Image (tube, rainbow, N blue to C red):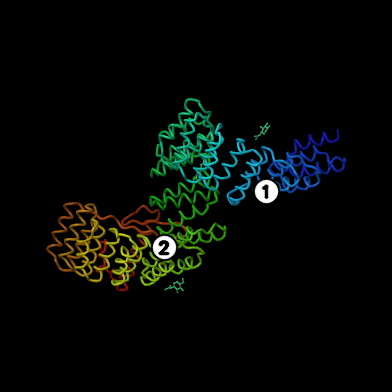
Amino acid sequence: MKADHLLYRISICKSMDQLKQIHLQAFIKGVSLDPFICSKLIVFCCTQDPGSVDYARQVFDIIPEPKVFIWNMMIKGYSRTSRAECAISMYVQMLRRDMKPDNYTFPFLLKGFKKRVRLEFGKGIHCHVCKFGFGSNPAVETSLIHMYSLRDTNDARVVFDACLKSNAITWNIMIAGYNRSKLFDKSRKLFYEMEKSKIKPTCVTLVSMLSVCSKLKDSNGCKHVHGYIKDGRIESNLVLNNALVDAYAACGEMDAALVVFKNMKTRDVVSWTAILSGFLNLGKLDLAREFFDQMPVRDLVSWTAMIDGYIKQNRFKEGLMLFKNMQDAKVEPDEFTMVSILTACANMGALELGEWVNVWINKNKIKNDVFVGNALIDMYFKCWEVSKAVDVFKKMPKRDKFTWTAIIVGYGINGFGYAAVNMFNEMLNASIKPDQVCYLGVLCACTHTGMVDEGRKFFADMSIHHGIEPEVEHYGCMVSLLGRAGLLAQAYDLINTMPVRPNSVVWRALLGACGIHKDVDLAEIAAKKVVELEPENGGVYVLLCNIYAACSRWDDLHELRNIMMIRGVTKIPGSSCIEIYGTVNEFVARDRSHLRSEEIYSTVEMITEDLRVFGYAPEVSETFLDIGE
Ligand SMILES: *[C@@H]1O[C@H](CO)[C@@H](O)[C@H](O)[C@H]1NC(C)=O
Ligand SMILES: *[C@@H]1O[C@H](CO)[C@@H](O)[C@H](O)[C@H]1NC(C)=O
Ligand SMILES: *[C@@H]1O[C@H](CO)[C@@H](O)[C@H](O)[C@H]1NC(C)=O
């Protein structure tokens, strides 16, 4: 009688504190050794959230002869808190005390075998399973397959093939196992085998299959699964619908995805984000944004996806603006958001914001992953903060290929050619294999510093030592390198003998070099090629005009001016960005869209006037590359 009331209280108990009070009552009333009370206490501690397997253990240790059910509960308690070693030790004690495991013992035990538990233990338990005659118990087989599938899908498949496979759970485990190991083809194949074996897929099967379809971009697979929902063979729910929307969207089937989305009775942020990512993957940024603005709730993933969408399409200003909105919405960014923001900062020269990101990363103990470090290095270099970039590089605990590429390219664009070459050699010494981008970086560094011999050597090494065939960009660098050094004939030769079709960049490199060394004839050839390849680019005419002027070829200059007038050649306006008090301002030549453009233009005039007073005349003789006077 006394115990009954306590048993009832345990059954409605909500927390460990309450449970401990009930336990105390049991002591006071002298029923603390009542087997039912002990059993219920242990069950609560081992199965409820939050429970406490350690508390259960205290109760367990005073039970004189625990039944197999109690042993199982203890094993379950350890397994669900990922303490596989304790669960195994419990199992061993159980055997020592002559208790026979039952059909629950092994599933509970194997559940705790997360990936880190060694395979040998799993195999040992497998032997016991056979020894105690549970080799063909479906629940035990399923947990064995699961245990193996976390380690090696081949082992799992052996057990899977030998078992009866009469229910969907066994199949689900194997299908999910293949998916987890990224063996998507095998996973899909098994799904179709399952259908052939007339086993009805469950919701779990279909979610796995959709996950696989999204990876394989298999829209027919999506439609096949969709059929189950359409004709009511399976009752859909939020998770399944989300998986379907996500899979359609991943396959680029936005119409189908939207139909499912619109028919959903309830939607959560995952459903919305699936559509959002679908549009973003297709590069339909503005559609994505429209959708994003309609989202009732936006989480970290959706914010970051949208921001990253802008950055990927070089719409940095809008990306940064959205980041500001994200902060206003009090959504905490993570390292992925930060890498996007750093990329934007790098491209807009927004050093102040970049610095803020750096501080933020350190303060928030963001996982200082290699890829965050790489983005920081890139940002500092693009903002001309060489020493800070190098500082980040030196402090990085781990570096990958991209880290080295960032430092080589960064030194190069900042005019530290020798440092870039040194870094490249250090990278080789650190046994990192350079790739095309890396070679482009070091070749450009040579170009800017005029290191002709080094450049030639790197260019040759590329294919000879590293098996990388130079691409058109590498040839562009070499043409520039040779041309600027005055080796115009060699540069022209290289263009004529290169195995890939020279593009306008290559010809423009030659044209630029002709400008420096005042070679009109070659300049005309190069300019003609650039115009052929890029008829809408007005800059090349200006360049050629400059060269004619520099060589006093006034007739040619006059003629070209006429052609330009007839063709209505305009130049793409130059633009530049500047960050003031954390806001990035973009200026385009002759642009008057800035809020304070009146003030800006009058200040520019003032400065120009002041300069004139001090006898300054703008330097125009060097404006060969793409810029008009
Ligand atoms: C274990 O066996 C009992 C009876 O033999 C059965 O009622 C129960 O459903 C089985 N449980 C599992 C998980 O196989
Ligand atoms: C499928 O596997 C991938 C990783 O390979 C994982 O991200 C995804 O969540 C898995 N899907 C399901 C439904 O288990
Ligand atoms: C190359 O690496 C070794 C250590 O692996 C180091 O002792 C040596 O100084 C390095 N050489 C250069 C040129 O960096």
The quarter of the image holding the N terminus is top right
Report the front residue among 411 and 48.
48
- Tag 1: amino acid: Ile
Callout 1–callout 2 Cβ contact below 8 Å: no
Report the front residue among 173 and 427.
173
Q: Is residue 579 above or below residue 251?
A: below
Q: Is residue 390 left or right of residue 38?
A: left
- Tag 2: amino acid: Ala
Corner quadrant of residue 453: bottom left
Report the front residue among 578 and 367.
367
Tell me the distance, in whole angstroms, between the alpha carbons under discs 1 and 2.
49 Å
Q: Is mark 2 within 8 Å of ligand 3?
A: no
Label at residue 88: 1
The quarter of the image holding the C terminus is bottom left
Which numbered mark, 1 or 2, is in the foreground of this view?
1
Q: Is residue 225 above or below residue 288?
A: above
Instruction: Find numbered disc 1 in the image and state the secondary structure of the residue it sits on.
Output: helix
Q: Is residue 126 left or right of residue 15?
A: left
Q: Is mark 1 within 8 Å of ligand 1?
A: no
Mark 2, residue position: 406
